[in-house]
Image: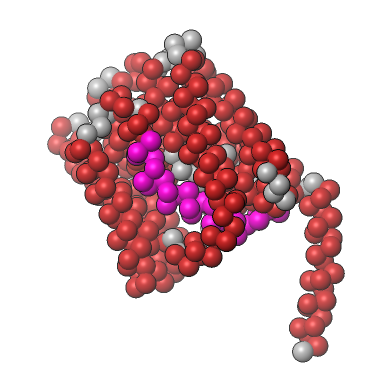
Amino acid sequence: MKRLRWPRWMPIDPYILLLLGTVGLAALLPARGTGADVASGASTGAIAFLFFLYGARLSTREAMDGVRHWRLHVTVLACTFVVFPLLGLASRGLVPVFLTDPLYQGLLFLTLVPSTVQSSIAFTSIARGNVPAAICAGSFSSLVGIVVTPLLAAALLGGSGGGFSADSVVEIVLQLLVPFVAGQLLRRWIGGFVARHKEVLGLVDRGSILLVVYTAFSEGMVRGIWHQVSPVRLAGLLAVQAVLLAVMLFLTWYGAKGLGFGRADRIAIQFAGSKKSLAAGLPMASVLFGAQASLAVLPLMLFHQMQLMVCAVIAKRRSRDPEALASEEEAAPARTAIGAGGRLG
């Protein structure tokens, strides 16, 4: 049986459609009473399992091999956890003209989330950039984000992020950090199984995130949070996010050039340093924001789709750069010689 494939001309990530469908389901049939308690418990377990899988997948050896390219990784981390948050703080001046305070809190949280892994690798590969560097940069960002994102949220969001306290810290450690460390410790025994069944476990990943979204948006519907958002405010949020993405794409590309990085490294820095992870951000928001999670994750969901569409166009254009085509032509004779040598041997 042939697998169904999403049409290449379709600009929308199919998973975004599933997320939007989940939001619609929560709007029509929100979990209430006992159902809400069951959904909340299942969501908590799903988050813990999700970070356990993250730990089981991350290759410690690959991460250590990438340390030698430390300047690139420090640059990506600085973009993700320093430049992005500074821009998020600067957007405070847009309240209340463009953003409401809850939407601003969600936008600020978006700037604190770690970078993506899969899409950074995919776009770097399409653009003919440094793929190994993108792999390590995305992995480092995800690893650092487990600790840094909650700390930054506690420092910058304060009580508006759901009320940070000692209990909140314990909850974050138990739901995020402990499962991740457990996955790393058990990777020696289960790493092979995880690698062999990555497609099935990928479905578990995405299903877990859908459950988190349903639980968060159900609680938001029951509490009437969505009455705070109007179409005009959503349009303002999209405009602010478009500017945020454009600024980060500009800074990561020309900033990396100013720091002396070559073209391949600049591509990896641009794609790893300008994006935010929906997979990591949604579970974290559920833990950090509690009842306010539905509004907190809205900017992240919108930004995720925007970054995919824009970066897909940039990656295709980068692949047709004269410099990229020239390097490809230079590599072709070497590949031909290697192939001939292999046949002669």
- Provide residue 69's location: percent of width, then percent of height: 59, 57
Residue farthest to the bottom, as pictured: 345
Above or below, comparing residue 332 to residue 41 in the picture: below
Side of 273 where 289 appears, left or right:
left
| Residue 329 x %, y % | 84, 60
Q: Is residue 320 visible?
A: yes
Residue at 49% x, 15% y: name it. Answer: 94
Near-viewer residue (231 or 159): 159
Q: Considering depth in this image, is 94 or 117 the residue closer to the camera? A: 94
Please name whichever residue, 7 or 237, is drawn nearer the observer in this view of the structure. 237
- Residue that appears at 84% across and 48% down: 322
Q: Main secondary structure of the magenta part?
A: helix
Q: Is residue 104 above or below residue 289?
A: above
Q: Residue at x 57, y 61 (%)?
A: 68
Horizontal side of residue 76 vs 104, given as left or right: right
Residue 180 position, x and y percent, is 33, 56
Q: Quadrant of the C terminus?
A: bottom right
Taking the image as drawn, is residue 17 in sight? Answer: no
- Give the magenta-colored segment's residue range: 125-152
Q: Residue furthest left?
A: 34
Q: Quadrant of residue 32?
A: top left
Q: Describe the colour scheme in one phrase.
A: secondary structure
47 and 208: which is toward the camera: 47
Total tally of numbered discs in the picture: 0
The answer to whether residue 89 is above or below residue 37 is above
Is residue 277 toward the left or the right of residue 266 in the image? left
Give the residue at x 29% y 39%: 287
| Vertical position of residue 230 compared to residue 136: above or below | above
Q: Is residue 281 magenta?
A: no
Name the spot of residue 260 as percent of width and height, x first: 71, 47
Q: Is residue 142 magenta?
A: yes
